[in-house]
Each structure stands twice: as structure tokens, then as C-alpha cells.
């Protein structure tokens, strides 16, 4: 799966609707989205913006041969380290080849850069379901973030 999506931007009023539901001003959500994803939920190839977290992949795999492989391949580390790349998709493909569920759970996606390991709290049954929802559009990405902010 390439995770190429529709690239649909938020419709006018979309942020305002979410802000009203949260009881905050729109500028609060817009600021959050700007910091987390430079104000846009998709990259230039219509894939939801994504960052992988090698320390989360390390944790999600648990101590076994898969984790050892991920460490050898530079995909897992015991501690957080800056790993920003302009395109994490090749790394995600390599991670999924080791173990798909921990790989998907180890990435943040969309306008809010919400980690997929908290998919349930974001309203999705699985990390894969959250990743697939993010492909539809920025509205779906925003509404994955909003329940977490409501707390």
C-alpha cells in the first residue's frame, strides 16, 4: 500500500466547525496545524504527511528477532532521536516488511501528526484504519486530532 490519498484540503469553515466543537477559537487549531504539519496534511504526492518514530517502533516490536533486525537496519532505536526526512515512505515500507502493525503504530500522520498507536483514542479501531482515514482528506485528519484535544 502506497498510502496515496485524495489530497483533499479542508473545506472553508472546516476548522471553525472543529473549533466550535472544542470550545476554542479557530486560530488555536490553525496554529496547532501549522506547527505540526506546516498547515497542510498531504505531501506533494498526495500522501498524508507522516513521520516515523524509531523509538516507538522499537517499543512496539518488543524484544525479539524482529526488533534486532529493525535495529540493524536503522529503523528502531531505544531512545527518541531526530529522524526527520522529507519522505519517510521508503522507511515505512521497510518497517512494514518486518511487522506491519507495529510499523503503522509507529508513525504520526496528517495535519495534527497524531501517532497511530493511539488510534483508539482518535476514534479509529486500528492504526491501519487511522492511516486509511487520513488518506481521504484533511477533514478526516483533523477529526482524528479533535477527540484527543477534547480529552
Image: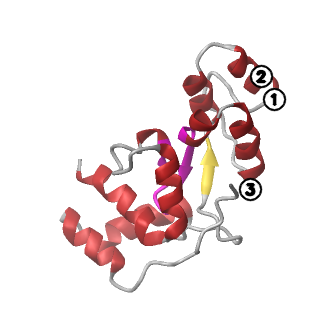
Q: Name the residue at 58% across, 33% down.
A: 102
Distance from the alpha carbon under mark 3 to that under mark 1: 17 Å
Q: Considering only order in the chain, which callout, 1 or 3, is on the residue closer to the N terminus?
A: 1
Q: Quadrant of residue 41?
A: bottom right
Q: Where 125 sits versus 64, above or below?
A: below
Q: Residue 69 has which mark?
A: 2
Task: Please give the count of numbered marks on the rendered protein.
Answer: 3
Towards the viewer: 71 or 39? 71
Magenta segment boundaries in residue numbering: 105-116
Distance from the alpha carbon under mark 2 to that under mark 1: 6 Å
In this rendering, position of residue 10 left or right of residue 80:
left
Q: Is residue 110 visible?
A: no
In this rendering, position of residue 118 left or right of residue 53:
left
Tell me whether the residue at label 2 lies in contact with that at label 1, contact meaning CB atoms closer than 8 angstroms: yes
Q: Name the residue at 69% across, 48% down.
A: 84
The residue tagged 1 is: 73
Disc 3, SS: loop
Q: Residue 87 has which mark?
A: 3
Residue 127, x across and y down, in percent = 49, 44
Disc 1, SS: loop
Q: Where 150 sits versus 25, above or below?
A: above
Distance from the alpha carbon under mark 3 to that under mark 2: 22 Å
Amino acid at each position: 500500500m502506497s498510502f496515496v490519498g485524495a489530497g483533499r484540503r479542508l473545506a472553508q469553515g472546516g476548522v471553525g466547525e472543529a473549533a466550535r466543537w472544542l470550545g476554542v477559537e479557530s486560530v488555536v487549531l490553525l496554529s496547532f496545524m501549522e506547527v505540526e504539519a506546516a498547515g497542510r496534511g498531504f505531501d506533494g504526492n498526495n500522501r498524508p504527511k507522516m513521520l516515523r518514530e524509531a523509538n516507538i517502533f522499537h517499543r512496539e516490536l518488543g524484544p525479539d528477532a524482529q526488533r534486532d533486525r529493525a535495529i540493524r537496519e536503522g529503523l528502531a532505536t531505544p531512545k527518541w532521536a531526530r529522524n526527520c526526512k522529507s519522505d519517510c515512505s521508503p522507511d515505512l515500507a521497510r518497517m512494514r516488511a518486518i511487522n506491519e502493525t507495529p510499523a503503522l503504530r509507529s508513525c504520526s500522520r496528517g495535519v495534527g501528526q497524531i501517532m497511530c498507536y493511539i488510534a483508539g483514542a482518535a476514534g479509529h479501531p486500528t492504526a491501519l484504519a487511522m492511516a486509511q482515514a487520513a488518506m481521504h482528506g484533511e477533514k478526516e485528519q483533523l477529526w482524528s486530532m479533535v477527540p484527543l484535544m477534547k480529552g
